[in-house]
Image: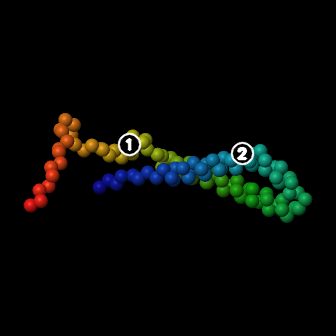
């Protein structure tokens, strides 16, 4: 028996958010992290800790980015026409007149 695949749009949205966060982190790393590290050179300990954290986040962001891409590929949302639930508002077939409601007898 073949099971239907269930799509969770929230997983796709979370993966997309992670992708945006990683891209913003890489832009910040490329454009602004040097100024941040340079401002910490008054204390060498703080500069070393910041450099270690930056290098760790850079190395961790690569697999996180790839996993988010895989999550987005596996949980691609379906088209609304296929996944929409159709509820008929008028279940009577067309052409038949609406039956009149007869009063109940009190017998």
Residue behind mark 1: 82
Q: Nearer the viewer, residue 43 or 102?
A: 102
The residue that appears at 39% across and 40% down in the rendered structure is 81
Can see residue 8? yes
- Tell me the distance, in whole angstroms, between the alpha carbons under discs 2 and 1: 38 Å
Q: In the image as oriented, which residue stretches furthest toward the bottom? A: 45
> Where residue 69 sits: x, y (%)?
56, 48
SS type, badge 2? helix
Q: Is residue 35 left or right of residue 90?
A: right
Q: Is residue 72 left or right of residue 88?
A: right
Task: Tell me the number on the disc at residue 43.
Answer: none
The residue that appears at 34% across and 44% down in the rendered structure is 86
The residue that appears at 56% across and 51% down in the rendered structure is 15
Looking at the figure, which quarter contains the C terminus?
bottom left
Can see residue 66? no
Looking at the figure, which quarter contains the N terminus?
bottom left
Res. 106 image quadrant: bottom left
Q: Is residue 16 left or right of residue 5?
A: right
> Where residue 50 sits: x, y (%)?
79, 59
Q: Nearer the viewer, residue 82 or 50?
A: 82
Q: Nearer the viewer, residue 6 or 71?
A: 6
Label 2: few (<14), some (14–19) or many (≥20) C-alpha neighbours in 10 Å: few
Q: In the image as oriented, which residue stretches furthest toward the left? A: 107
Q: In the image as oriented, which residue stretches furthest toward the top? A: 95
Question: Of circles 2 and 1, which is in front?
Answer: 1
Q: In the image as oriented, which residue stretches furthest toward the front? A: 106
Residue behind mark 2: 27
């Amino acid at each position: 028996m073949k099971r239907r695949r269930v799509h969770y749009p929230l997983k796709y949205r979370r993966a997309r958010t992670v992708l945006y966060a990683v891209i913003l982190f890489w832009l910040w790393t490329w454009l602004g992290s040097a100024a941040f590290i340079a401002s910490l050179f008054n204390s060498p300990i703080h500069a070393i800790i910041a450099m270690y954290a930056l290098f760790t986040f850079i190395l961790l962001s690569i697999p996180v980015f790839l996993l988010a891409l895989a999550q987005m590929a596996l949980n691609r949302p379906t088209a609304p026409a296929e996944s929409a639930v159709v509820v008929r508002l008028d279940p009577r077939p067309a052409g038949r007149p609406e039956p009149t409601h007869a009063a109940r007898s009190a017998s």
